[in-house]
Image (cartoon, coloured by chain):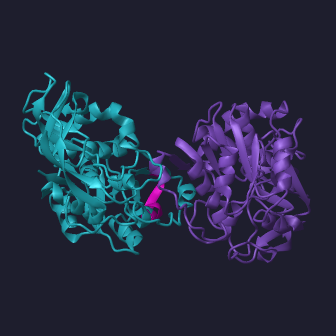
Chain colours: A purple, B cyan
Amino acid sequence: MNQAREIRLVSRPDGLPTVDDFALVDVELPAPGAGQLLVRNTFVSVDPYMRGRMSDAPSYVAPFELGKVLDGGAVGVVESSRDARFPVGTNVLHSLGWRTHAVGPAQAFRPIDVVGVSPSAYLGVLGMPGFTAYVGLFVIDDVKPKETVFISSAAGAVGSIAGQLAKLRGARVVGSTRSKDSAKKLQDDLHFDDVIVIDPGHVAQQLRNAAPTGIDFYFDNVGGEQLEAALAVLKDHGRVSVCGMIATYCEPVPGPRNIIAIVQKRLKMQGFIVSDHMARNAEFVHEVAPAVAAGKITGPETFVDGLDKAPAAFVSLFAPGGHIGKLLVRL
Amino acid sequence: MNQAREIRLVSRPDGLPTVDDFALVDVELPAPGAGQLLVRNTFVSVDPYMRGRMSDAPSYVAPFELGKVLDGGAVGVVESSRDARFPVGTNVLHSLGWRTHAVGPAQAFRPIDVVGVSPSAYLGVLGMPGFTAYVGLFVIDDVKPKETVFISSAAGAVGSIAGQLAKLRGARVVGSTRSKDSAKKLQDDLHFDDVIVIDPGHVAQQLRNAAPTGIDFYFDNVGGEQLEAALAVLKDHGRVSVCGMIATYCEPVPGPRNIIAIVQKRLKMQGFIVSDHMARNAEFVHEVAPAVAAGKITGPETFVDGLDKAPAAFVSLFAPGGHIGKLLVRL
């Protein structure tokens, strides 16, 4: 048996999550059985979409079970192997979540190439967040050079990559964030053309100031007032790829009062879930990995150390931040 | 000079329009000049979209001017001609609106073929309403056989044709209306599979009852609660063509509270304006005119007699009706 620790959901958040919704628990893991691996996690992913799974309303992914460990993206190193294709020391990606160690069948793990890249990149720029950005921009839509693109939650794991991918395509990119520090980093380090620091109640005017001739495309990560502002500032025939609506995850938010703009401006709005598009993942890696290696795209990362910090890190996703890019627990 | 009467907008409605927003005025029309026609109108169109033009907010069509005649679709007969291509007696379609007679340059008029079809059809099933239905179903979307289609305001000029076109394509069609009489006509005469008589506050449940396995496509004419219900009942990867939002024309209506469904169910929502798609009009007429001639599609019409009745007819569009199909003033 192996000593391990894991984080369980102990209550379903009502509105904003708190650290009391989680418990850190010591467990004993069995030795891996035939065809199984024991993996020591090195990085565990902290993602906004997990909030949805904490409610038991029907959704596109099954809810977390109360009293059970939280699944989610993680990378680790094989410590003990009963599958010859995964020698001890292999770096792997998996979705067994918030725990120090995981035991499971070999097919639950994917080997990753960590030459010249941190394993954590597979949870960020080369992982689901980067691919989500790619799908929203180039699979659901086809953002073009010289278009003006607005990306909400631009300091987030998805938004920070989406902005850079759109820039690489030749678009003018306006981001939004709730933190002045993040805004500065987005402009200085990630070369966003303009960044709005959200002033609640005035977002439409802020967006109009940043994009006086209107926006062609909105990458929606948040819903709420920012979606309403985007609908107001989109040009005729504008498009919206709806990736998430973090504003609505914790509390009911009124729908956009100006939704009539969809007709008046002939807008197209399309929601997507990245896992529907895995057939395009190879194309994404093929296109983006070289840009990452060449330093044309950076996947900003913020780390907290120790599994016990995962709940607080998760809670921080729903408050004005300051952290930029992918939020990770480093073990 | 010719004696004529016309209806002018004398005040911009605040919320629901009233007959007092309009005035019937006697005018003298000049004799047609070189290249001009004098047309005696036979039918004048009464359309919900005109409400938008009665406000002076910026929109996709210029607002009506106060004190001026209301433009809009009309058909008539040439009474006096200074263009050899339009002999006296020619039936023509034009957009000079709510007046007994119109004088204008020949290019403002289009001759119509009235053999076997009433001139009024060019304001309905073979005109803008029919083409709008066609665009929403088959240009913006591509409704397929066996899909379940929901059409709001199904007794209206657009909805009544949209339902029949979708049926002809092999879809199962659920309509909505605010009138029991209209519901009966839609089922008995136009062969809708099911029709909801709107019960405010319970539309989602009504729609679920009518489409227990969900809807694939929603043709939105109204916005408001029906849009919210459709978002709730759409299947994964469902689509919405947004043609109009009559619920929002007269008063602000909250946006759909469940707009997060766009992500959860990967929905596509697209607004359109029929005039953007005139390049497809010939294809529409080619496809639909034979179906009309063969009696496979009927363009229901409701008439009021006399130009003085146009304002009351327009006001009636915003109240639970009983009239079905295209609302026309017959002169």
Asked whether residue A142 is in view, the answer is yes
Residue segment shown in magenta: B228-239
Q: Is residue A283 above or below residue B242?
A: above
Residue drawn at 35 percent across, 56 percent down: B51
The one nearer the camera, B152 or B248, is B248
* Residue B15 drawn at (x, y percent): 39, 66
Residue drawn at 22 percent across, 63 percent down: B312
Q: Is residue A6 above or below residue B96?
A: below
* Residue A194 drawn at (x, y percent): 75, 43
The one nearer the camera, B246 or B13, is B13
* Residue A93 drawn at (x, y percent): 78, 48
Where residue B305 sits, quadrant-wise, is bottom left
The one nearer the camera, A157 or B209, is A157
User: From the viewer's perspective, is B97 left or right of A266?
Assistant: left
User: From the viewer's perspective, is A126 left or right of B301?
Assistant: right
Q: Is residue B148 above or below residue A65?
A: above
Q: Does residue B230 belong to the magenta stretch?
A: yes
* Residue A161 drawn at (x, y percent): 75, 43
User: From the viewer's perspective, is A109 left or right of B199?
Assistant: right
Where residue A84 sits, quadrant-wise, is top right
Residue drawn at 78 percent across, 47 percent down: A124
Q: Quadrant of the N terminus of chain A?
A: bottom right
